[in-house]
């Protein structure tokens, strides 16, 4: 990836978004982006495809990046979110439990506390609404701040914080019920 492109800001505020900068963003974000998309889509294969699509779109649209609207990472996750929502609309269904986790698997023979907590968390996550799963994935897989969360979701920072708090509270309650 070579070449230098600028985005549309007044000359005194222009910054350069080079191919090298996009490569660094790729290296720093690809694993988190993939994990976020697996959570959102519930399908490893689709997550791989949407991850590639998100970076392809970021490359094509790098002139549109505006640092006054958020970080490069938030911008990338916004692109990925839109691509994942397109995929979900295409399928016209909600994401299934990750990796085919079924309720009977939770009660299997693995009695270690960590495995039980992980299974309870997966079941609790699956019980959340898709928007709540997305909020938690953006916060914990992407590591986005509430401001960046707000920008990705198109809501106020206060609203993003409130929605996230409610989703985490609901998740904790569901995990406690699983225990």
Image (cartoon, rainbow, N blue to C red):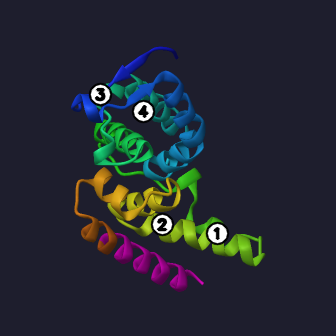
Choose the circle earlier in sequence order: 2 or 1: 1
- Vertically, is 90 above or below 99? above
Count residues near mark 3 (Cα–Cα under 10 Å), then give few for <14, some for 14-19, many for 20+. Answer: some
The image quadrant of residue 117 is bottom right
Q: Nearer the viewer, residue 139 or 102?
A: 139
The disc at residue 118 is: 1
Q: CA distance from mark 3 to mark 4?
A: 19 Å
Front: mark 1 or 3:
3
99 to 124, vertically: above or below: above
Across and down, in percent, residue 67 comes to 34, 42
Q: Which labelled disc corresponds to residue 7?
A: 3
First-in-chain label (3 vs 2):
3
- Of all residues shown, which one is farthest toward the front? 12
In this rendering, position of residue 8 left or right of residue 62? left
Mark 1 Cα within 10 Å, few/some/many (few <14, many 20+)? few
Residue 125's mark?
2
Query: Callout 4: few (<14), some (14-19), or many (20+) C-alpha neighbours within 10 Å?
Result: many
Residue pointed to by mark 4: 54
Magenta-colored span: 163-179
Secondary element at image label 2: helix
Q: Earlier in the sequence, mark 2 or mark 4?
A: 4
């Amino acid at each position: 990836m070579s070449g230098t492109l600028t985005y549309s800001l007044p000359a005194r505020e222009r910054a350069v978004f080079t191919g090298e900068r996009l490569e660094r963003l790729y290296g720093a974000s690809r694993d988190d982006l993939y994990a976020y998309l697996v959570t959102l889509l519930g399908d490893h294969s689709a997550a791989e495809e949407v991850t590639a699509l998100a970076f392809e779109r970021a490359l094509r649209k790098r002139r549109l990046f505006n640092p006054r609207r958020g970080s490069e990472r938030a911008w990338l996750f916004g692109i990925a979110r839109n691509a994942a929502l397109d995929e979900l609309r295409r399928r016209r269904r909600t994401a299934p439990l990750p990796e085919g986790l079924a309720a009977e698997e939770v009660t299997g023979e693995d009695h270690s506390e960590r495995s039980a907590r992980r299974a309870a968390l997966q079941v609790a996550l699956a019980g959340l609404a898709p928007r709540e799963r997305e909020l938690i994935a953006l916060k914990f897989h992407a590591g986005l701040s509430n401001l960046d969360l707000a920008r990705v979701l198109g809501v106020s920072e206060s609203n993003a914080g409130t929605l996230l708090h409610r989703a985490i509270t609901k998740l904790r309650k569901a995990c406690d019920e699983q225990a």
